[in-house]
Image (cartoon, rainbow, N blue to C red):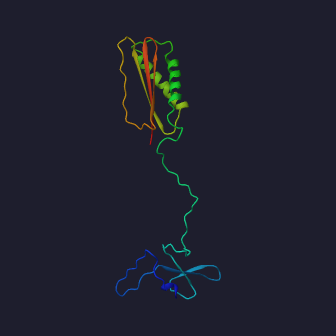
């Protein structure tokens, strides 16, 4: 058969031991009268050989070509989507509104200052959960209340975070007898 005497395609190296026939990857397919396909490797003259190779020739291959109209998407998020960052301006307005609601008409009393700070933090947390949900963001609320006696107050924080996705908002309100500082941190969860 002349098709079996072809040289192997480019890039294929045939190795054989002494006394062995070279191995070829040829499958012979034919269809009977009923349309059923049969595969034979005996090299009968009625069968048409199909040679599977990786060459760049124009011969038809039996393998299926990959789809060209497929769009591949990442299965993971590398950061917040465009326009879905932590909304600091909206949260700032919400925190100011909550501070005025909770602290309106209050004066500093040492016994109730801790409960007042907890109430402010819980009120902001409830509003954050209700109206300010951002996909994959976690938030931390810190409330500090100190008596205004002229001594001053140092307030600071430090964090290691991604400056492209994480953010914070800090609001201070002076109520005459005390000062309340609220910091809301928004951290993107990867």
Quadrant where the C terminus sits is top left
Picture mark count: 0
The part of the image, by quadrant, that contains residue 180 is top left
* Residue closer to the observer: 188 or 38: 188
- In this rendering, is residue 129 above or below 98? below
Q: Going by the picture, which residue comes out furthest to the right?
A: 34
Q: Measuring from the top left, give residue 133's x and y in whole percent.
A: 53, 34
Q: Measuring from the top left, give residue 163's x and y in whole percent.
A: 42, 36
* Residue closer to the observer: 126 or 27: 27
Q: Measuring from the top left, give residue 62's x and y in whole percent.
A: 55, 73
Query: Residue at the spot x=49%, y=34% of the render?
Result: 86
Query: Residue at the spot x=52%, y=52% of the render?
Result: 73
Query: Residue at the spot x=51%, y=39% of the render?
Result: 135
Q: Measuring from the top left, give residue 30's x and y in whole percent.
A: 58, 81
- In this rendering, is residue 153 above or below 165? above
The part of the image, by quadrant, that contains residue 115 is top left
């Amino acid at each position: 058969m002349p098709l079996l005497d072809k040289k192997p395609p480019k890039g294929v190296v045939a190795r054989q031991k002494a006394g062995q026939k070279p191995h070829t990857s040829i499958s012979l397919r034919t269809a009977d009268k009923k349309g059923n396909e049969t595969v034979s490797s005996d090299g009968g003259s009625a069968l048409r050989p199909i040679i599977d190779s990786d060459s760049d020739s124009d011969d038809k291959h039996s393998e299926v070509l990959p789809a060209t109209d497929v769009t591949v998407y990442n299965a993971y998020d590398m950061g917040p989507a465009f326009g879905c960052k932590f909304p600091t301006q909206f949260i700032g307005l919400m925190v100011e509104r909550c501070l005025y609601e909770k602290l309106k008409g209050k004066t500093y009393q040492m016994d109730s200052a801790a409960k007042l700070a907890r109430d402010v933090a819980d009120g902001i947390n409830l509003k954050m959960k209700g109206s300010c949900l951002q996909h994959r963001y976690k938030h931390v609320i810190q409330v500090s209340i100190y008596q205004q006696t002229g001594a001053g107050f140092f307030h600071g924080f430090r964090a290691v975070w991604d400056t492209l996705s994480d953010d914070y908002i800090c609001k201070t309100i002076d109520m005459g007898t005390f000062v309340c500082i609220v910091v809301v941190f928004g951290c993107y969860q990867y």
